[in-house]
């Protein structure tokens, strides 16, 4: 019954991007080259932006590009290069918990997967109308004005805090 | 598209980030793993927003993005400070208060 | 109006290939036109350089072709210690960001690839920030300290000037009430100056501060003189491009001039009325032919200003550059937003 609603192109797009994202995520947490880890994170985040587009939510997709890829990753690369930017892969960037950490991770994955499958397995996303940017901005500046202002103050605090911490006095 | 496609992908990303936080030996890599988890949360918000045909999911995703940016700024300043004082970026080396 | 996502997946894929090819062709053409007109000819005249005026007949028309042949036949060298994959990918990412910016630039009522993208300007500025990643990759993967220093300078500069660039555009967005580039053009074409609608209302008249900020910030985003510290040849050899030869260097070159073309196009669209021209109805079919030509003329005008500054001013110092962005441009841009917003509410 649901099969009719599933558009082939959208699903193919989703699975290709999802596979790339999953591979990127694994590499982020396992690669021994720290700059490569940052670049794989770019892949994951760009894939995320593509998924947002697929879900018809344009604005957050481009915000993801400008904030995450344009600023956060650049900051990461900056931080790496200001401390050390080794060309060669390092011996070990993961600690001895590699095996042990799989247990809680697997447990978490099992719980999340069970919950998702139990609660939402028959729900579908219908892409009839993308969310217009106008609606998003109206929501932010009307319904969520106070949180928005608080976030602005938080950003200012973070800005000043980062400057104070990193100053060489 | 099933909603679960997005939720399971997001769960996978979250678990990968969780694993990274547990195992990474470099503070910047730990921060990256946290970013991975936040990105996973965002994907959930956006997916639920699309599922409910509502803007709220997107609005919250935007707030999470903002917080993530602030977190990275302060986090990297701290990493830089630690590196300057200890010449190390391994969070396990921060054990001067240990008895 | 449909979104980009729906456009692509709603039976759009057939024309996608053709449009991609057109845009991919436009980037080198735009880059070469700017490179030829301004870099080779205008600079030669302004700085009395005789070399580029010599090969071929009239004004040395052969110079550009000769340069192209030279670049393509050069050996493709990858340094011994380089991270080969990242090294090879970096120029492609820089060009990709240029390519993605081209997609939203409207040249006529129907002459645009991504039609009716809700967040047009914002999208263009967002994908323009991709090039920072390419620059950092190039600098790091070259395994060369000059390259690394150059890319760090470039990244600091691009981040610092991203802010005034975005903030300068906000004034236009407030006034036009939309981020869609096509609607901004229509707003300017249908506007009137004190009740006289002969010229429309090019937003440069009301947003002259924004225009100035945009041009300065765009100059810095392009790392053109006087903001060319990332490639300062007297200090860093050639910055992040130092290890690149042959066609990979050509990629950076095309990326740089192609991006200059797009920024000039964005400035022309946001401030000079884009493809619209006085006395012709914006929705007339003829605009699909006239529009691109009008836009091209305006782009050349804006690019002339950019390159004029490029060939005239000496380089800033690194700290001067940062304090210009943070202490002057950003506060002025914020004040501009405030005033624009207040006037928008008042009238």
Image (cartoon, coloured by chain):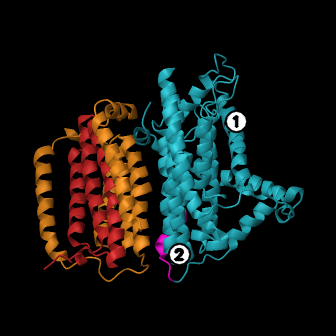
Chain colours: A orange, B red, C cyan
The answer to which of marks 1 and 2 sits earlier in the sequence is 2
C85 is within the stretch colored magenta = yes
Instruction: Identify which residue, A78 or C199, lies in the foreground.
Output: A78
A68 is within the stretch colored magenta = no
Residue C264 percent location from the top left of the image:
64, 45
SS at mark 2?
Answer: loop
Residue A142 percent location from the top left of the image:
31, 29
Residue located at (52% from left, 31% from top): C340
Other-residue count near label 2 (Cα within 10 Å), few / some / many at <14 / 14–19 / ≥20? many
Q: Which residue is mark 1?
A: C294
Residue located at (47% from left, 37% from top): C117
Chain of the residue under label 1:
C
Give the spatial CA distance, label 1 vs label 2: 42 Å
Instruction: Identify which residue, C31 or A168, lies in the foreground.
Output: A168
Q: Would you say A15 lies left or right of C337 here?
A: left
Which picture quadrant has residue C202?
top right
Q: Would you say C342 lies left or right of C77 here?
A: left
Other-residue count near label 1 (Cα within 10 Å), few / some / many at <14 / 14–19 / ≥20? many
Residue A33 percent location from the top left of the image:
37, 75
On screen, C108 above or below A160?
A: above
Residue range highlighted in magenta: C81-91
SS at mark 1?
Answer: helix
Which picture quadrant has residue A30?
bottom left
Residue C335 is labelled as none
On screen, A137 above or below A81?
A: above
Residue lying farthest top?
C195
Mark 1 vs mark 2: give the one in front. 2
Residue A154 percent location from the top left of the image:
31, 48
Chain of the residue under label 2:
C
Residue at mark 1 shares a chain with residue at mark 2:
yes
Q: Which residue is mark 2?
A: C142
- Name the dominant secondary structure of the magenta segment: helix
């Amino acid at each position: 019954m649901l099969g009719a609603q599933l558009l082939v192109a959208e699903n193919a797009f989703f699975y290709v991007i999802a596979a790339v994202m999953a591979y990127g995520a694994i590499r982020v947490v396992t690669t021994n080259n720290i700059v490569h880890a940052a670049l794989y994170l770019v892949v994951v985040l760009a894939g995320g932006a593509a998924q947002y587009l697929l879900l018809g939510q344009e604005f957050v997709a481009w915000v993801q590009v400008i904030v995450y890829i344009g600023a956060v990753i650049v900051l990461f690369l900056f931080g790496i290069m200001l401390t050390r930017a080794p060309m060669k892969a390092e011996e070990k960037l993961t600690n001895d918990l590699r095996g042990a950490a799989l247990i809680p991770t697997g447990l978490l994955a099992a719980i999340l997967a069970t919950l998702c499958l139990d609660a939402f397995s028959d729900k579908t996303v219908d892409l009839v109308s993308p969310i217009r940017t106008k609606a998003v901005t109206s929501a932010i500046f009307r319904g969520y004005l106070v949180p928005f202002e608080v976030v602005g103050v938080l950003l200012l605090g973070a800005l000043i805090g980062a400057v104070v911490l990193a100053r060489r006095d | 598209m099933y909603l679960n496609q997005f939720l399971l992908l997001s769960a996978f990303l979250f678990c990968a980030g969780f694993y990274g936080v547990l195992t990474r030996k470099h503070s910047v890599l730990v921060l990256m793993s946290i970013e991975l988890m936040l990105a996973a949360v965002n994907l959930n918000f956006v997916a639920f927003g699309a599922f409910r045909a509502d803007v709220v999911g997107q609005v919250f995703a935007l707030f999470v993005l903002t917080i993530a940016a602030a977190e990275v700024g302060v986090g990297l300043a701290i990493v830089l400070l630690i590196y300057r004082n200890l010449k190390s970026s391994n969070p396990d080396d921060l054990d001067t208060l240990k008895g | 109006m449909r979104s980009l996502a729906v456009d692509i997946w709603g039976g759009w894929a057939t024309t996608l290939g053709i449009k991609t090819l057109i845009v991919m062709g436009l980037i080198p053409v735009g880059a070469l036109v700017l490179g030829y007109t301004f870099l080779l000819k205008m600079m030669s005249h302004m700085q009395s350089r005789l070399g580029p005026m010599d090969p071929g007949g009239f004004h040395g028309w052969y110079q550009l072709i000769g340069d192209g042949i030279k670049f393509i036949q050069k050996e493709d060298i990858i340094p011994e210690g380089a991270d080969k994959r990242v090294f090879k990918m970096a120029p492609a990412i820089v060009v990709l960001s240029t390519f993605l910016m081209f997609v939203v630039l409207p040249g006529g009522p129907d002459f645009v690839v991504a039609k009716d993208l809700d967040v047009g300007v914002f999208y263009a500025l967002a994908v323009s920030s991709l090039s920072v990643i390419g620059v950092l990759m190039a600098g790091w993967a070259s395994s060369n300290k000059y390259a690394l220093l150059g890319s760090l300078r470039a990244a600091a500069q691009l981040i610092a000037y991203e802010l005034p660039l975005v903030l300068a555009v906000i004034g236009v967005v407030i006034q036009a009430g939309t981020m869609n580039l096509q609607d901004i053009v229509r707003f300017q074409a249908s506007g009137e100056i004190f009740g006289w609608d002969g010229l429309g209302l090019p937003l440069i008249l009301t947003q002259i501060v924004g225009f100035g900020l945009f041009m300065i910030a765009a100059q810095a985003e392009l790392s053109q003189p006087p903001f060319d510290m990332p490639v300062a040849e007297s200090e860093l050899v050639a910055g992040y491009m130092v290890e690149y030869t042959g066609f990979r260097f050509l990629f950076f070159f095309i990326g740089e001039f192609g991006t200059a073309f797009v920024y000039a196009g964005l400035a022309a669209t946001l401030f000079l009325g884009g493809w619209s021209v006085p006395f012709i109805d914006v929705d007339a079919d003829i605009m699909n032919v006239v529009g691109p030509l009008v836009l091209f003329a305006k782009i050349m005008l804006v690019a002339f200003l950019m390159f004029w500054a490029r060939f005239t001013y000496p380089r800033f110092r690194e700290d001067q550059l940062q304090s210009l962005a943070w202490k002057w441009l950003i506060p002025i841009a914020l004040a501009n937003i405030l005033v624009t917003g207040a006037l928008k509410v008042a009238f």
